Amino acid sequence: MLAKKYIFVLLGMRTIFRTVLFLWIVFFIDCMGGLGFGGGGTGEYTGVTNEQKRAAGYLYLNTIRQAAGMEALLQNSFLQHSSGNYAGELQYHIGVPSTCNIPYFVDNNQGDRATFVGYPTSFVNENIVSSQYYDNGMHKVIDILMSGVYHRFKFLSFESNEVGIGVDTSKYVFQMGNSHMRGLCEEDQRYGAGTSFPGMCLSSISIWEADYIAAIENVSSLQPSIILWPPDSSSSVKPVFYEEVPDPLPDYVISGYPVTVQFNEKYHTTVDLVSFRLFKNSDNSEIVNTRILSKATDPNAQLTDLQFALFPLDLLNYNTTYRAEFSYIENLVPQTLVWTFTTKNPNGPVYTVNTSPYVVNKPAGTHTMAFYIPPTAAYPCIHTSWTMSSSGPLGFSSESSFSDSNTLLLDITGDVGTSVTFNFNSGTTIITVNLN
C-alpha cells in the first residue's frame, strides 16, 4: 500500500455583521486523516465510478447532518457542475497553481466558480479533500473533513440547505449554498430601504439587508438550536485528531478527537463560556490535558462567538465512553449541556509500541490486535511501505489494516511457535508477534 498524502482545502464563507468574507487556504498533510463519526471511514472504494462516489457522498453527508439533528442538504445541479469543474482542475493539474491555460480552470474563488456555471449567487461554502496516492471511499473523505473543526463547522452550517459534490478520481469538492439566497438572485430587482449588497448575484441585482437576513433565517430556523459533536450517545468515534490548516493546534502533530458545540444565531445572541470539560464516564475521571478554543482563543480567528471546541491533547482511549460538559451563561442564566459518546472498539487488545523491537505474545482467543505507534518528527505517521518476516513452523496467515495513521490492526493466525515480525518506518519500528 502506498503512503497516503492529503491536501485539505478550506474555503469558507462567513457572515460577520452582514459582511461576506471569503477565505482560501491550501495545506498538505502527510498522514491519513480518516477520523470520523460512526466508523464510516473503514475500507476503500476500488473500481467505483465517480458517479457512485458522488451518490454515496450525498447520502453519507446527510447521514452526518441527520445525526446532528439538522435538515438534509438538497442536491443542486449547478453546485455539482461547479464542484465537478474544480475537482477536474485539481485532478488535471496537481500541485501547480491554477492558470487560465489549463482545462477546467475557472477561478480561485468558490463564489466565482459557482456563478461561472450559472449558480445565481456567490453565497457559497466549499470544502475540498485531495488524496494524491490512492482512491478513498467517500465515507472516509467526509470523515477526514469532519475531523477538522473548521471544516466540520462548514458541513454543519446553519445557513446552508443545498449542496453539490464534485469527484474526479481522487479529488473531492463539496459546495454548499442557500436556496433562498439563490431565489433572491433569480428574481427581478427588489426595492427596499437601508443597506444593500451588490455583487452577490450573477445578475446585476443587489440584495437588501432585510432580504439577506430573511434568506439566512429561512434556513437556520429549520436547524437545531444547538449542535453537539460527536452527537449524544454516538459510537465508533475515532480517538485521534491530526492537523488541519489553518492548524488549530500548531504545537501538536496529533491529539484526541475534538469535541465541539455550536449555537444557532437564529436563537442565540451571546453565550458566555464558563467551562468545557471531558470525563471518562465509567469512573468520572476528568481528562485534564485539554485545550479550549473559542473566538477569543482561536489562533486562526476562524471561530465565531457561538462556536466552541475542546481538544484532548492526548489520544482518547479505544472502546471508552466519555462525557462532555459545557457550562455557559446566556441571558444571565447559568446552563450546562451534558452528553456522552463512545470511541471505536478495535475488537481486541490495544498495545502502545513505545520500544523497538516490541515483542508481544498473542492472547489466546484473540483475533484482532491493535498497535499504536506514537508519532515522531521523522515519522509522524506509519509509513505504509513495510516488510514482514517469520520464523518457526511458518504455518500462518495474516490480515492488516489501519484504524488511523498511527494505529495498525493485525489479525494473525497460525501454528503454535511461529513468530511474525513487522518492520516499519525504515527499520525504526519493529513489532514481533509470537503465536502461542
Image: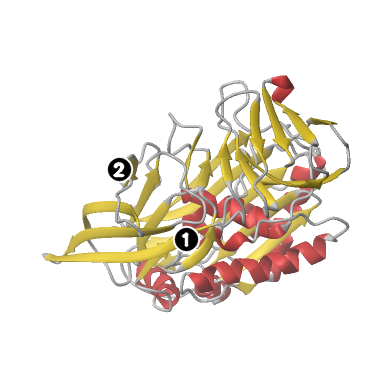
Residue 96's spot in the image, x, y percent? 73, 32
According to the image, label 1 marks what residue?
342
Name the one closer to the observer, 43 or 304. 43
Q: Is 121 placed above or below 35 here?
A: below
Q: Is residue 74 left or right of residue 225?
A: right
Q: Residues within 10 Å of mark 2 (few under 14, many from 20)?
A: few
Q: Residue at the location (59% across, 29% down)?
A: 380
Q: Residue at the location (51% across, 51% down)?
A: 318
* Kind of residue at disc 2: Val
Quadrant of the drawing holding the N terminus: top right
* Res. 199 visible in picture: no
Mark 1 to mark 2: distance in Å? 18 Å
Residue 297's spot in the image, x, y percent? 30, 40
* Kind of residue at disc 1: Thr
Name the one closer to the observer, 204 or 426. 426
Residue 255's spot in the image, x, y percent? 47, 39
Residue 328's spot in the image, x, y percent? 21, 59
Q: Which mark is residue 400?
A: none
Q: Is residue 39 left or right of residue 272?
A: right
Q: Is residue 36 left or right of residue 98?
A: left
Name the one closer to the observer, 13 or 141. 141
Callout 2: helix, strand or loop?
loop
Q: Earlier in the sequence, mark 1 or mark 2?
A: 2
Callout 1: helix, strand or loop?
strand
Q: Residue at the location (71% across, 31% down)?
A: 432
According to the image, label 2 marks what residue?
288
Q: Residue at the location (76% across, 56% down)?
A: 167
